[in-house]
Image (cartoon, rainbow, N blue to C red):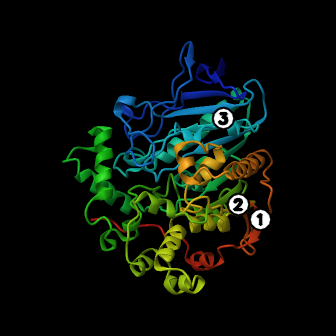
């Protein structure tokens, strides 16, 4: 039994010496009178609460392989936190807080790939939590605070500050880590004054680079609301909002850049909104101005990010020249062809989309950060998908036998060694700020390559950095009509 700020909880020990506590509410259910509201702290309870099963997932479509469909029958009390600790009665352990990805549209902490037991066995307290996604988390609505998914993340991190010590953790030594939209959330948190002091270190894995203006976010929300038949989103059943957002993602003409601009190539209807209050500016602009200079950062990406989406069959196919003109800086066509003269148009398309969506946002974050920074690139290529998006997730958690792990690694025997590399670097960084390779600066761009034989190299993606670094990743502000 463990006592936290809201009451007593009972967890579950596993065979590896790690105790897990699951499904602990950190905020009230964001439905009913709190629909589309900022998270509200949960009230204390009497007696001892069982904390042995995950809480309900937030409303979302089923788009990830192996992830069961969400159902309102699962419950709507979705703002819950989970903790794995190797020493519940101890003190001073580093705390690592995972923020899941999923294109701001899907994701949940109960995915088997995010099981924190093996990572916690390395001597850290691991925390994960659910936060709102899709329309509930990022729909831009009159009368509702923007970026509610980010506000959930703030609330969960405040919960960690108040309760980490109850699980043997040190609230003064918190590292946030996350992948894809989770890494995009971390980039936002580093830019948000309201997150100051909630974490000491950050690990951003494949930073999602999409950020919306309020005008674009309102336009997308309007397109979704049109499919509700005049019903207010506040009064719509969660499953109806999920269905409406899915319809907008897949409607005829969704891949028309004349209407949707760069959004035509993302198939993502939600992203953090640079609203000037919750999120004051694009993360790389805020960091370049000195935000989070006291936060130590690891940031990186996988070499072949976009191959994951091609393998899922959901990646739009379009003329390379049109894509270049729509999403890339001026001169991109010539620059990519000069840097990769032997590449086919298909290979150039993969490289371009990898850069736009994940690789260059990650590189820009490294260049912008004014504090200590370490950069990496995952180059291990165990399957025909290569070092694709998401490959680092089962390596980080040593969940190689889970569905996503098997799909991305193909059961390659080197996987355990790569996982050991990630776990050693991540937990070492969480404990001391040193992942085991030299710090990054924008001149030499020293980057650690995760592979069967790891190495440290200078600026492995120099051509892409030179092209994107001057302009950066733009705020998306074309309003769908």
Question: Which is more toward the observer, 197 or 359?
Answer: 359
Question: Which is more toward the observer, 304 or 300?
Answer: 304
Residue occupied by mark 3: 117
Q: Which callout, 1 or 3, points at the residue further toward the start of the chain?
A: 3
Q: Is residue 371 visible?
A: no
Residue 462 in percent (x, y) is at 66, 77
Q: Quadrant of residue 319?
A: bottom left
**How far apart are the alpha carbons under marks 1 and 2?**
8 Å
Pick the quarter of the image with the N terminus. top right
Q: Quadrant of residue 235?
A: top left
Q: Answer yes or no: do the residues labelled 1 and 2 have beta carbons within 8 Å?
A: yes
Residue 225 vs 73, above or below: the answer is below
Residue occupied by mark 1: 455
Residue 382 in percent (x, y) is at 61, 58
How packed mark 2 is, by other alpha carbons closer than 10 Å (few <14, some 14-19, many 20 or more), is some
Residue occupied by mark 2: 451
How packed mark 1 is, by other alpha carbons closer than 10 Å (few <14, some 14-19, many 20 or more), is few
How packed mark 3 is, by other alpha carbons closer than 10 Å (few <14, some 14-19, many 20 or more), is many
């Amino acid at each position: 039994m463990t006592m936290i700020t809201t009451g007593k909880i009972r967890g579950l020990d596993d065979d590896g010496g790690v105790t897990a506590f699951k499904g602990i509410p950190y905020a009230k259910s964001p439905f009913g009178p709190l629909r589309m509201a900022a998270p509200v702290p949960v009230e204390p309870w009497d007696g001892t609460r069982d904390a042995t099963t995950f809480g309900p997932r937030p409303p979302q479509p089923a788009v990830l392989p192996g992830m069961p469909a969400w159902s309102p029958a699962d419950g709507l009390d979705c703002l819950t936190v989970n903790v794995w600790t190797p020493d519940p009665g101890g003190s001073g352990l580093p705390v690592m807080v995972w923020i899941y990805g999923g294109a701001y549209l899907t994701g949940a902490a109960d995915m088997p790939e995010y099981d924190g037991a093996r990572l916690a066995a390395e001597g850290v307290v691991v925390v994960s939590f659910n936060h709102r996604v899709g329309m509930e988390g990022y729909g831009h609505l009159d009368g509702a605070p923007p970026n509610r998914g980010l506000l959930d993340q703030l609330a969960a991190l405040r919960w960690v500050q108040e309760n980490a010590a109850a699980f043997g953790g040190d609230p003064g030594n918190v590292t946030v880590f996350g992948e894809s939209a989770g890494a995009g959330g971390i980039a936002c948190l580093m830019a948000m004054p309201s997150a100051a002091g909630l974490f000491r270190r950050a690990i951003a894995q494949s930073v999602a680079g999409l950020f919306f203006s309020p005008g674009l976010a309102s336009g997308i929300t309007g397109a979704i609301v049109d499919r509700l038949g005049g019903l207010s989103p506040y009064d719509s059943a969660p499953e109806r909002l999920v269905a409406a957002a899915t319809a907008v993602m897949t409607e005829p003409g969704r891949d028309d850049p004349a209407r949707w601009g760069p959004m035509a190539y993302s198939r993502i209807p939600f992203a953090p909104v640079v609203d000037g209050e919750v999120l004051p500016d694009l993360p790389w602009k805020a960091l370049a101005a000195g935000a989070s200079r006291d936060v130590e950062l690891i940031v990186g990406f996988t070499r072949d990010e976009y191959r994951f989406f091609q393998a899922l069959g959901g990646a739009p196919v379009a003329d390379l020249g049109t894509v270049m003109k729509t999403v890339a800086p001026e001169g991109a066509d010539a620059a990519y062809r000069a840097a990769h003269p032997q590449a086919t148009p298909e290979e150039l398309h993969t490289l371009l989309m990898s850069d736009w969506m994940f690789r260059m946002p990650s590189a820009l974050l490294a260049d912008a950060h004014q504090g200590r920074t370490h950069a990496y690139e995952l180059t291990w290529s165990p399957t025909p998908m290569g070092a694709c998006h998401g490959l680092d997730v089962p390596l980080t958690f040593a969940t190689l036998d889970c569905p996503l792990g098997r799909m991305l690694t193909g059961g390659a025997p080197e996987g355990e060694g790569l996982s050991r590399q990630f776990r050693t670097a991540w937990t070492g960084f969480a404990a001391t700020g040193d992942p085991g390779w030299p710090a990054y600066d924008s001149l030499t761009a020293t980057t650690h390559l995760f592979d069967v034989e790891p190495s440290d190299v200078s600026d492995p993606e120099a051509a892409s950095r030179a092209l994107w670094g001057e302009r950066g990743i733009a705020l998306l502000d074309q309003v769908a009509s």
